[in-house]
Image (cartoon, rainbow, N blue to C red):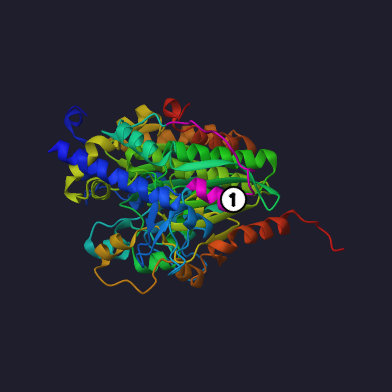
Amino acid sequence: MSEVFLLKRKKLDSLKKMRDSFSGKEEIMECPKCREKMARQVLAMKKFICPECGHYYAVSARERIELICDTDSFREMDAGLKTRNPIKFPGYRKKLELMRNRTGLEDAVVTGIGKIEGEKVAIGVLDSSFLMGSMGTVVGERITRLAETARRKKLPLVIFSASGGARMQEGLFSLMQMAKTAAAVETFKNTGGLFISVLTNPTTGGVSASFASLGDIMIAEPEALICFAGPRVIQQTIGQELPEGFQRAEFLLEHGMLDMVVKRQDMKSILAKIIRIHSGGKSVK
Amino acid sequence: MEENKVLTPYDRVQIARMKNRPTVSDYIEALFDDFMELKGDRLGAEDASILGGIALFRGMPVTVIGHRKGRTTEDNIKYNFGMTSPEGYRKAVRLMKQAEKFKRPVITFVDTPGAYPGIEAETNGQSVAIAESIAKTITLKVPVITIITGEGSSGGALAISAGDSVWMLENAVYSILSPEGFAAIVWKDAKRAAEACDIMKITAGELLEYGLIDGIIPEGKQTLSAMRKMLFAELARLSRLSEQALVAERYRKYRHIEGEYAPSL
């Protein structure tokens, strides 16, 4: 049985290699909306937007940084921080190892200093492919350190969120990260700092109910799901159909929860513009 | 006390949810003088799931904010079973700002199964309301003392529970999510709530050991006197701090809340 499986696997691998050698790329992506197939690197050039139907693919933290920061301008901070598995959740360490191998990330966030159109920023990006981008002690600590660095260096703070919420596997320690990150960004803002929060699909639960909703400027990507309680939970509670477009970026914009919805291809220039307005002169010329 | 040693975490969840358990109104009546309820968020709504107001504690003016549950079904419907909507959190923030202006300490009572998961609550910005309530609590320039009296579940609890000093009743529980919600997310099976309780670390004893709370108030005849004693001592201690020192100390508390479990290289 296992030999058959191995053989199959080998065949698949060789097929994949052959295909890759034709395209010169590693990974083929299929659009979940229109089923269009495309090499990942080609898709990267399209900013991970399906050229056929306009679907927004999830963007990994590293890819997001490449989309937003000037070439080679990003310097990562606080790499290597690892959770101590505070509530000794069964199987958690193994799961983390698996996630690390699969994503090449240490946890669900990447933070550091980079430049956006020449403007220096403290930037953090959550990655939904790592345990749903959930916030445990590592994500909380890195977001907090990022806000503190931004405060010390007097830099604008930009955080791209993509998260299912607080990380269950770290219990109340995860809930405490909501308090900790809220304290960090609020203190940063109270000392004059500019915090731009960008919500991408999905931003929910304990992340949307803490630092991610505290931006001086609140931006979302089109159609991003943004909520506290997810649609399924609400449907179960009230037992009726949800309104069309409910909890999507455009819905939040309409109800006053966002400043703007910005297309992925415009995000970098919009961020740069906001930062420039905040760093400009204080008197008319 | 003796029999409590054999209570499982899930038993405590059941106790914390008991209908005849004292509510915030009972504590207010027993602990404070001259309580006056203050209502409304000044943005168009009054959410009765949060009870707020001003009172005297041993002659000292304080602001009191708490989740409200009822004993009868009728009351519970009025208070939405302690599940707060954005309007309730906005009322809490309003009362905290007012407390700051008049330099009154804030005492919060936490007892909620979680923030209300409804269409209107989401439409009116549940996330923003909770985030702003946490941010206000945690940067407030007056002392904040929190007592978790029943269930303290999820962001709905944290909105008013990030105090300088956080206490739990002996049988109260404090958790990232209700055990049912936790089991539903982790195992896709809400019926495994009892099992979830065993690994979630939600009891006062476990959380005190972790340093995530500051103390436990015993339940029984001595509950009220223990609460009074604690409030008196903590108000005295925190009132001695300058505004700046108070805010800095609270920041440090949550900055390093993980203690020895802080993530490391």
* Relative image position of residue B32 (x, y in whole percent): 43, 47
Query: In which quadrant of the rendered view does residue B115 lie?
Result: bottom left
In the image, residue A199 above or below residue B9: below
**Magenta part of the chain:** A61-82
Give the residue displayed 51% in from the left and 62% down from the top: A220
Residue B57 highlighted magenta (yes or no): no
In this rendering, position of residue B71 left or right of residue A220: left
Residue hosting label 1? A158
* Relative image position of residue A182 (x, y in whole percent): 52, 46
Give the residue displayed 20% in from the left and 28% down from the top: B5
Q: Quadrant of the N terminus of chain A?
A: top left
Residue A74 highlighted magenta (yes or no): yes
Q: Is residue A184 something one can see in this rendering? A: yes
Front in this rendered view, residue B231 or A49: A49
Q: Quadrant of the C terminus of chain A?
A: bottom right
Q: Is residue B29 something one can see in this rendering? A: no
In this rendering, position of residue A70 left or right of residue B77: right
